Image (spheres, helix red, strand yellow):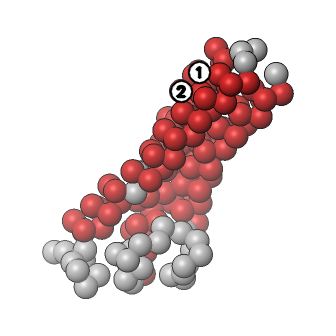
Amino acid sequence: MWFWWFMFVCNMLYSLTMILAGWYMWKHYPKEINSVAGYRSGRSQMNMDTWKFANENCGTRWWKIGWIMLVPTIIVQIPFYGKSDDAIGWIGLAICIIECTILVISTIPTEKALKNQFNEDGSRKK
């Protein structure tokens, strides 16, 4: 039973991290462009306008996706309560892979939005 709870908590961390990090980036993004915190890509770090836009855009997306992922994560794990450690481990791994993939792929729309809103030099498109 303890392994199920361990995997449950570990898999919930992905959704909760996206919710908290998304809210932080959306509402309290770092006021200085840096390489430690915030949405960091070449386009987002061009100037303060791109930095603010990218953090707010990605932050709102992560916040929403985190809440959406929370429910299926719980629902998928519940039937495995009391199952073998191997079954729990495999379902935990599958959830981990899916959530990590969603996390990485969710940055693509932010990059597209940056490309649509800003020129190559970082100035806003008219």
At a point 68% along the width and 25% down the height, the residue shown is 86
* Residue 63 numbered mark, or none: none
Determine if residue 59 is in view: yes
Tell me: residue 3, above or below residue 36: above
**Residue at numbered disc 2:** 72
Q: Secondary structure at mark 1?
A: helix
Image quadrant assignment for residue 43? bottom left
- The CA span between labels 1 and 2 is 5 Å
Quadrant of the image for the C terminus?
bottom left
At a point 45% along the width and 45% down the height, the residue shown is 102
Check disc 1 and give the amino acid type: Ile
Q: How many numbered discs?
A: 2
Q: Which x, y percent locates residue 62?
A: 49, 50
Q: Neighbour class for label 2 at 10 Å: few (<14), some, many (≥20)?
A: few
Q: Which x, y percent locates residue 115?
A: 24, 68
Q: Which x, y percent locates residue 90?
A: 61, 29
Determine if residue 60 is in view: no
Q: Which x, y percent locates residue 7?
A: 71, 34
Check disc 2 and give the amino acid type: Pro
Query: Residue lying furthest left in this view?
Result: 126
**Residue at numbered disc 1:** 75
CB under 8 Å between callouts 1 and 2?
yes
Image quadrant assignment for residue 37? bottom right
Question: Of residues 75 and 33, which is closer to you in this image?
Answer: 75
Tell me: residue 52, above or below residue 47: above
At a point 59% along the width and 21% down the height, the residue shown is 75
Q: Secondary structure at mark 2?
A: helix
Q: Neighbour class for label 1 at 10 Å: few (<14), some, many (≥20)?
A: few
Q: Residue 3 vs residue 109: left or right? A: right
